Image (cartoon, rainbow, N blue to C red):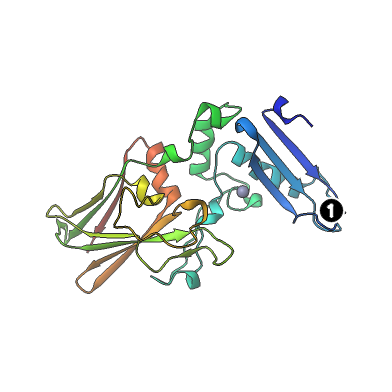
Amino acid sequence: MDFSKYDFVILFDALQDKTDDRGSGGAHGGGSDSRSVITVIAEKNKPKDIFDETTRNTLTHELGHYRGVTDVYQYIIEAEDNPVSHEKFDTYKCIMNWAAAGEWCDYAVNCMNLAGDAKRIGIEFPDFFNSLYPKSMEFDITVGGKPERGVMIELYPSRAGASDHPRDIYPVALVSGKTNSDGKWILSDFKNYIVPNKDKHPEINIPPSLSYGRCFGFLAKVSYGTSVKYKWMSEIDIQMVTFEGKDSYIVNIDF
Ligand SMILES: [Zn+2]
């Protein structure tokens, strides 16, 4: 098959009848020249009805990837995989979270609207996903409404799953800092912390086995005296500020 003739191709493997067939499900992958290939594969020993609801849901999810949306389920962290605050983090109801959700979250809608009618996103928007990170990040910490100096903030990285660990919060902070006299702590080059770049920021602790080479956000631990507050900073929420026309992800916390 000559893939170069098409902007995107959908392949159905409707019967897993070989011993080396890969697992069932769907996938979107990059062809050459930013072309897209979507595959939808039957379960073992169960011929696929390509017109049924499950196939339609799978296909809708994979077409979401074709429109530039990432997997929203990658941001869910179970409580037992969060050694910092021991809470679960759940994410948005969205076809990119589970294919049968029946609706798109605002983030997905924004990505799809940005992609618009681009047949090959990679050509019309080089670096589509990375372009969604805001320039900077800012914590504004107040105590009783007044800016507080010297409040400690630690950013613990959220990792996508890998063969040696589930999706989790890594227990060593990637970076930490203290608020200045205006109660602010600012990272002016936020992208190079999310996609950790030790050449630019030698002080950071990059977690091992970091899937996709980036943090899927952070769990921030904010300590004022003996009081501690946590803030989930999922990559989706971080990138949402770009769609809102802002260039800084701002977190306000009052003790
Ligand atoms: Zn997916």
In this view, which residue lies farthest toward the left?
181
Q: Nearer the viewer, residue 155 or 103?
A: 155
Q: Tell me what residue is drawn at x 48 percent, y 40 percent.
A: 129
Q: Quadrant of residue 65?
A: top right
Q: Is residue 133 above or below residue 80?
A: above
- Marker count (numbered): 1
Assess disc 1: are there few (<14), some (14-19) or many (≥20) residues with their C-alpha within 10 Å of its C-alpha. some
Decide if ligand 1 comes within 8 Å of the CB at mark 1.
no
Residue where numbered disc 1 is placed = 16
Q: Is residue 5 visible?
A: yes
Secondary structure under tag 1 reads loop
Q: Position of residue 111 (x, y in %)?
A: 51, 37
Q: Is residue 191 left or right of residue 102?
A: left
Q: Is residue 108 left or right of residue 48?
A: left
Q: Is residue 26 left or right of residue 97?
A: right
Quadrant of the snapshot with the N terminus: top right
Q: Position of residue 212 (x, y in %)?
A: 51, 51
Q: Position of residue 133 (x, y in %)?
A: 39, 42
Q: Position of residue 225 (x, y in %)?
A: 19, 71
Quadrant of the snapshot with the C terminus: bottom left
Q: Is residue 35 visible?
A: no
In this view, which residue lies farthest toward the front?
199
Kindly identify the amino acid type of the residue bearing the numbered disc 1. Answer: Gln
Q: Is residue 104 above or below residue 234?
A: above
